[in-house]
Amino acid sequence: MRWELEPNPTRGKVLGAYALFLLLALFLLGLIFLAYGVPPLKAYALLFSPLTDTLGLAEVARRTIPLLLIGSGLALAFRVGFFNIGAEGQLLLG
């Protein structure tokens, strides 16, 4: 078997690859949970529970938006050649 990159993969193949690697990541995470003695299904329920109600989604958004803003600011700075390695500390200090 030989793996080769396709220049223009179909949308189905791209989505299939994303789904495959997402399932692989969840499987490997389940193995880590098992290694620590935590039931994987219980851990997944706890992991995804904030996404099941509006208050949880609001909290996820509240914590995600500053990280996205810092990430996009750093990407822009790195793109023009300015390296700022203190963004995480700047986020914590306000």
Image: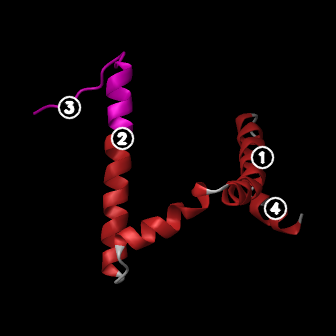
Tag 3, which secondary structure?
Answer: loop
Q: Earlier in the sequence, mark 2 or mark 3?
A: 3
Disc 1/disc 4 C-alpha distance (Å) = 10 Å
Give the magenta-colored segment's residue range: 1-18
Q: Check disc 4 and report the residue beneath it.
A: 91
Q: Quadrant location of residue 86?
A: bottom right
Q: Check disc 1 and report the residue beneath it.
A: 69
Q: Quadrant location of residue 19?
A: top left
Disc 2: CA contacts within 10 A as few (<14), some (14-19) or many (>=20): few
Mark in the foreground, 2 or 1: 2
Q: Nearer the viewer, residue 79 or 45?
A: 45
Disc 3 residue type? Answer: Trp
Contact between labelled residues 4 and 1, with CB atoms less than 8 Å apart: no
Image quadrant for the C terminus?
bottom right
Tag 1, which secondary structure?
Answer: helix
Residue 39, x across and y down, in percent: 35, 76
Q: Earlier in the sequence, mark 3 or mark 4?
A: 3
Disc 4 residue type? Answer: Leu
Disc 1/disc 3 C-alpha distance (Å) = 37 Å
Disc 4: CA contacts within 10 A as few (<14), some (14-19) or many (>=20): few
Q: Is residue 49 left or right of residue 66?
A: left
- The label shown at residue 3 is 3
